[in-house]
């Protein structure tokens, strides 16, 4: 009967895609399933991504190995030392992080071999057999983009979502200062950087969380003609100067820079609802890595 | 006699390197000299830079041409539309800017050919025959680095300058919050981003204005062991996360992010004292392009 019940529940959970909603007895039953390996979890994820696996991607294992049995999964923006410690404390040995572990986009480490901070973090991961996998290119390639879904939901913009043009949200006319206040409150951000007139009205918002780069921002402005661009991070000699010049030209264009980490963190929270049904025997927990900055 | 007086004054001004201190009659005399061309001014600058001209550099003309006669020189961080308008208003047709004109490091413009902001700015420059030259790689290669000299002086750190290790300033023990307050007040910055404990004491400051990149910042920390890194700009997945992890490891390391434009602007003010004596007949004026951001 136990086996039958587990099979039934597994089928149901797959069918409704929401095993997290099932009761404790179901969780206990799932826990009796053999734990998947890190590689098996990654494969389950990749099955849902169009075109995966990609021949070239930064989404690789940064520590640990594919064959280790998963005891628990943490999703986060950055696998900071703090997030790693929390993973260890909760006996979760698999961290899925959106951003690099070792302070550069490709997670190159040869240049850091003598660096004490790198060595401390690497040793902490090795001592506790923590696997870290980056989920960056793939989550953005999911349909819909998991980060955008998370951020949109966190901002309360679901009702303005247009799947034909998912980057643009046409909201009722709102003052820039009210959009700023909403973003700060909903995303838990202490301060944002803004270019624009706080009293100007905005209706057409181009939302590009993260740091997609100056050309992405500027070409997005060219094609979408927003009156507000909301991004996570920029290079100051690119997008900021473009927006400044556009305003001097007379364009009604504003910019909000949320901060990279806080602009995408809800995507890693979204990931729990995406991943948990695929691994019913494993607890998937989102730990926000948080905003690194004080504003002074 | 006029010629003789001009020659004498030119010699004197070169000897004391401070023609700006001379009286109006001297200026009038200099103004009678044939105006140098843009190319001649650039050549005068390059004569002072070790190893110049560089085979590969971003320091090229972004508009105008080398043969045009200079009517006045503006130095600035960014040749914004506002700075261009001020140059036009003061009849100065040569802007020397530290950073790109067209929103990308190499000032590539093919991708912007249909962009209305680019076209507006390019047309404004062309209509008024304004030359823009970038002075980035060369000013940093000047001995001493002109940007560092300007920023150091603006911050009031001259007395801590060590020409053997010009990036590091060993100050009397100061609280992080006091260093922040000084930088904001001296550089005219409304808000800075900080990682650290505002009450911690700092003595060894690694000062890297601008955006020299994560590896530059991290390798600087490795080699100099500062307790405070002050920079202009960073990529948030690089230096910020490194400093965050270093602190979690237990290192007493803090970070101040000044903002790119405001962190280097004093270098372009320094440039007036550097360039004016070389072009006594031409007025050299610093126009700050200013901080583009509000903090909200």
Image (cartoon, coloured by chain):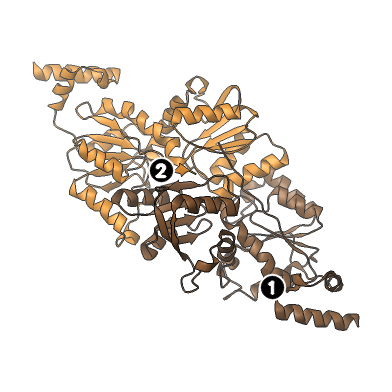
Chain colours: A brown, B orange
Residues A68 and A286: in front is: A286
The label nearer to you, 1 versus 2, is: 2
Task: Report the side of B239 relative to A130 (left or right).
Answer: left
SS for tag 2?
Answer: loop
Q: CA distance from mark 1 to mark 2?
A: 45 Å
Residue B16 x/y as whole percent: 29, 17
Task: Report the side of B18 relative to B242 (left or right).
Answer: left
Q: Which of the labelled discs sits on residue B292, or is there none?
A: 2
* Vertical position of residue B30 compared to residue A96: above or below: above
Quadrant of the snapshot with the N terminus of chain B: top left
Q: Residues within 10 Å of mark 1 (few under 14, many from 20)?
A: few
Q: Which of the labelled discs sits on residue B38, or is there none?
A: none
Q: Residue at x 18, y 49 (%)?
A: B127
Q: Which residue is mark 1?
A: A43
* Vertical position of residue A143 compared to residue B270: above or below: below
SS for tag 1?
Answer: helix
* Vertical position of residue B278 compared to residue A252: above or below: above
| Residue B93 seen in the figure | no
**Residue at the outermost left position:** B1
When asked about the image quadrant of residue B174, the answer is: top right
Residues A69 and A126: in front is: A69
Task: Report the side of A15 relative to A1 (left or right).
Answer: left
When asked about the image quadrant of residue A17, the answer is: bottom right
Q: Residue at x 44, y 31 (%)?
A: B187
Image mark 2: chain = B
Q: Residue at x 78, y 59 (%)?
A: A93
Q: Residues within 10 Å of mark 2 (few under 14, many from 20)?
A: some
| Residue B222 seen in the figure | yes
């Amino acid at each position: 009967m136990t086996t039958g019940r587990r099979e039934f529940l597994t089928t149901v959970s797959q069918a409704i895609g929401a095993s997290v909603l099932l009761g404790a007895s179901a969780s206990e039953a799932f826990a009796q399933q053999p734990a998947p390996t890190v590689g098996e979890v990654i494969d389950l994820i990749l099955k849902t991504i169009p075109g995966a696996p990609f021949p070239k991607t930064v989404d690789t294992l940064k520590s640990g190995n594919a064959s280790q049995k998963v005891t628990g999964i943490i999703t986060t923006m950055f696998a900071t030392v703090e997030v790693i410690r929390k993973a260890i404390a909760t006996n979760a040995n698999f961290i899925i992080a959106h951003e690099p572990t070792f302070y550069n986009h490709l997670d190159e480490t040869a240049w850091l071999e003598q660096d004490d901070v790198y060595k401390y973090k690497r040793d902490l991961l090795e001592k506790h057999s923590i696997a870290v996998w980056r989920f960056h290119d793939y989550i953005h390639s999911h349909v819909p983009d998991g980060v955008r879904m998370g951020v949109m939901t966190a901002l309360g913009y679901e009702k303005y979502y247009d799947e034909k043009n998912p980057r643009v949200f046409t909201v009722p006319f709102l003052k820039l200062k009210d959009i700023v206040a909403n973003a700060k409150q909903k995303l838990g951000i202490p301060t944002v950087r803004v270019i624009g007139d706080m009293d100007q009205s905005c209706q057409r918002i181009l939302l590009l969380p993260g740091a997609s780069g100056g050309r992405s921002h500027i070409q997005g402005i060219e094609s979408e003609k927003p009156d507000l661009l909301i991004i996570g991070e920029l290079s100051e000699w690119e997008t900021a100067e473009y927006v400044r010049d556009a305003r001097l030209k007379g364009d009604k264009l504003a910019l909000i820079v949320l901060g990279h980490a806080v602009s995408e963190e809800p995507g890693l929270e979204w990931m729990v609802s995406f991943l948990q049904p695929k691994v019913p025997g494993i607890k998937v927990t989102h730990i926000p890595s948080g905003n690194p900055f004080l504003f002074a």
